Amino acid sequence: MQELAKEKNTLVSKKGQHFILEGTPVNGLFFIQKGKAKVLKTGIYGKEQILRFVNDGEIIGHRGFAISKNYSISASSIEDTVLCNFSNETLQKMLRNIPSLTYEFMLFYAEELNKSETKVKTIAQMTVREKVIDTLLYIHRKFKENNSGYINIQLSRKEIADFAGTTEEQVIRNLSSLKKDNLIQTQGKKIKIIDLEKLRKEISEHNYFINS
């Protein structure tokens, strides 16, 4: 593993820069060494849907590896991000020669499939307010809080909408409603959750929190 790991490529993706473009040839897998990024897919009428956010140590591009010649997603950095890339050839050598890694990949793919199926079913049943709450809980769980108590990632209202599967106007309206209910606090793009348990309770009947 150590010898094969030496074959990795390291690159820096500036804030807002795409490092994977939908439809381009697959060039192995990307791992976030340090930073934050978002994974996107183009829907009807060219509208972008954010599939997930990624943080330190997470993987991007795995759904195209070994099954497709072109990426079915795009990925761009939310902040300056250091990435490690393993080519298709290096990954194939790893998987053929390291059984424990192959086994872990198999478990990883099974978990990803389960998350995707559950997300599709549950999101279809949520109201817009519930989708916004679920998104806030997801980014809070994933990125934690900074020293000031704000969620440790700053997303635009459009990015929240693109992930929640709603419109920017509806996100603004529902964030304002959550502020009036004293459940959250905002300062520009920064969001602080005031009452975590009440937010969880609002979507508890779905028995599901986005975690993909």
Image: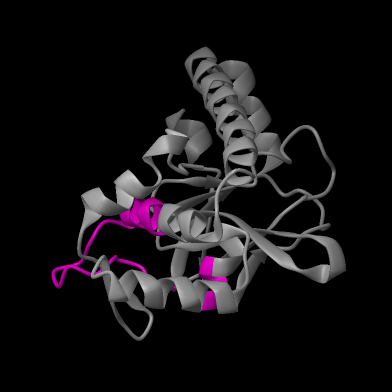
**Closer to the camera, 104 or 208?**
208
In the rendered image, residue 194, in percent from the top left (x then y), is placed at 20, 64
Q: How many marks?
A: 0
Q: Examine the rendered structure and indicate whether residue 9 appears above or below residue 64.
A: below
- Can you name the residue that lies furthest to the left here? 147
The answer to which quarter of the image holds residue 168 is bottom right
How did the renderer colour the structure? Answer: one colour
**Residue 77 visible in rendering:** no
**Residue 31 visible in rendering:** yes
- Magenta run includes residue 92: no
- Magenta run includes residue 145: yes
The answer to which quarter of the image holds residue 190 is bottom left
In the rendered image, residue 180, in percent from the top left (x then y), is placed at 30, 76
Q: Could you tell me which residue is drawn at 62 percent across and 65 percent down?
A: 166
Q: Examine the rendered structure and indicate whether residue 175 appears above or below residue 100.
A: below
Q: Could you tell me which residue is drawn at 47 percent across and 54 percent down?
A: 130
In the rendered image, residue 56, in percent from the top left (x then y), is placed at 38, 52
Q: Could you tell me which residue is drawn at 51 percent across and 67 percent down?
A: 160
**Closer to the camera, 100 or 122?**
122
Does residue 44 appear left or right of residue 122 in this picture? right
In the rendered image, residue 28, in percent from the top left (x then y), is placed at 67, 44
- The residues colored magenta run 136-160
Q: Examine the rendered structure and indicate whether residue 205 appears above or below residue 135.
A: above
**Closer to the camera, 101 or 36?**
36
Does residue 44 appear left or right of residue 74 in this picture? right
- Can you name the residue that lies furthest to the bottom here? 188
